[in-house]
Amino acid sequence: MSARFGAAEKRHISEKRNTTVRNISLFRRRLRLSAAVAALLTTGTGMAGTHVAAAAAAGCQVTYTVTNQWPGGFGANINVSNLGDPITSWRLTWSFPAGQTITQLWNGTYTQSGAQVTVTNVAYNGSIPTGGSTGLGFNGTWNGSNPAPSSFALNGVTCTGGITSPSPSASPSTSPSPPPPSSRQPCDIYAAGGTPCVAAHSTTRALYAAYNGALYQVRRASDNTTRDIGVLSAGGVANAATQDSFCAGTTCLITIIYDQSGRNNRLTQAPPGGFNGPAPGGYDNLANATAAPITVGGQKAYGVYVAPGTGYRNNTTNGVARGDQPEGMYAIFDGTHYNGGCCFDYGNAETNSRDNGNGTMEAIYFGNNKVWGYGAGNGPWIMADLENGLFSGVNQKYNAGNPTISHRFLTAIVKGEPNHWAIRGGNAQSGSLSTFYNGVRPNVPGYNPMKKEGAILLGIGGDNSNGARGTFYEGVMTSGYPSDATENAVQANIVAAGYR
């Protein structure tokens, strides 16, 4: 939890954060379809071949990324690109160089014996076509140092970043080129600015260049089966075709929005609090998985359509700001889908789903509610929900510098540190960010110092007020107060993503 982190630990985390995106390259080897390899294939542990009585093209590239690190623990992502012939199942092996231990892993099944780790595919991600990739992530422990593994092997073939060719007797085939290097995504940009993401949520795309895990989970009504929805490639757009196939002929709800930061700050169905939701047990409703179709970079994706009564929350988080600790956050919303209900929020909230007083929240609000605060025009406005107040600036009610803003795709930013906070916003499809407020905390008692509690919510107020509506596509929360320059670079990335 963030309350355990002092200044020394934060410096330690910053020093370790840049550990690795490294391509592992040691040597090349030729894999021939001998009787020994055939025996391996029989057990499902060898490299699949496509040429009878000839050599199979084999090759792979691995990118290992420490996404975050804290005293004694860390999170990491591994992306595996298949540069050879298609495979239908995989086994990835490596050795930790300094006694690291995996404690939790997703998108695979693992065993660890001493330093040696073996991860095998799960049912939905065994096949990797030529030029395709898969990814996995894990949390682990370390003691003393946390260097990256120096070598990985896929189905027994060391990953070198290159491929071998089929034997001369094999039919000609074209060896694929390695995928181009991924550009930085929002959380890579925040990390480079010294304010890493501690939560990263999106149903539309990866927010790290190396992320290749699940974005969200859906549950279909026909049999209550669930399915994780991942990305088309590392750092890429959601694989909406997986959802469309899984949900064909029935309806699906979004049950989990995964946290890409590795801290497991995922969002799930919001529990009852000061107000009950309409679902059984007083929980809020879950969003219809197909209600907000869009395209990102020309690829189909789905947002989170929040109707009144819908809400997501995590009251037990890791690394999110508490008390008066600095933080930043951004979200991409549908600027045309809003109302005056309380409260369409994304951000930091109370851990008991109740109103715990002034300053116990710090979240982005979007809508045209005028009960607590408002800006110029008729709204909607980007404001900050700080509990017992929606603030458009330093004043409790009206602040002329906060404009009505309603772009179809809207970038909304709130950030805060001791006695200083800001609101920024812009068009997520073009242009730069504008600053609507940048100054001291509101001129109302109870907001300086802040008393943030560190829960994360989406679509609802801190006390589970659930009368609002809106649509969410992506958002993050950071450790530390991001610079305007960092946010400007994130905005450029969002524009380049191509929301349509």
Image: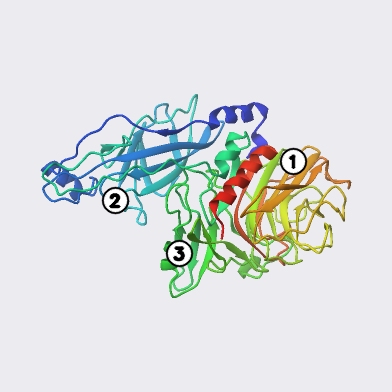
Screen quadrant of the C terminus: bottom right
**Three-letter code for the amino acid on which mark 3 is drawn:** Gln
Residue located 55% across and 43% down the image: 263
The CA span between labels 1 and 3 is 39 Å
Identify whether 15 is placed above or below 466. Answer: above
Q: Tell me the crowding category of disc 2: few under 14, some 14 to 19, or many 20 or more residues within 10 angstroms, Cα based.
A: many
Tell which tag, 1 or 2, sits nearer the viewer.
Answer: 2
Outermost bottom residue: 249
Residue 63: x and y, percent?
41, 38
| Residue 323 numbered mark, or none | 1
The CA span between labels 2 and 3 is 22 Å
The CA span between labels 1 and 2 is 47 Å
| Residue 89 numbered mark, or none | 2
Secondary structure type for disc 2 = loop
Secondary structure type for disc 3 = helix
The residue labelled by disc 3 is: 243
Question: Sequence order check: which comes first, mark 2 or mark 3?
Answer: 2
Q: Is residue 482 visible?
A: no
Residue 478: x and y, percent?
64, 42
Q: Is residue 223 visible?
A: yes
Question: Do labels 1 and 2 touch, CB within 8 Å?
Answer: no
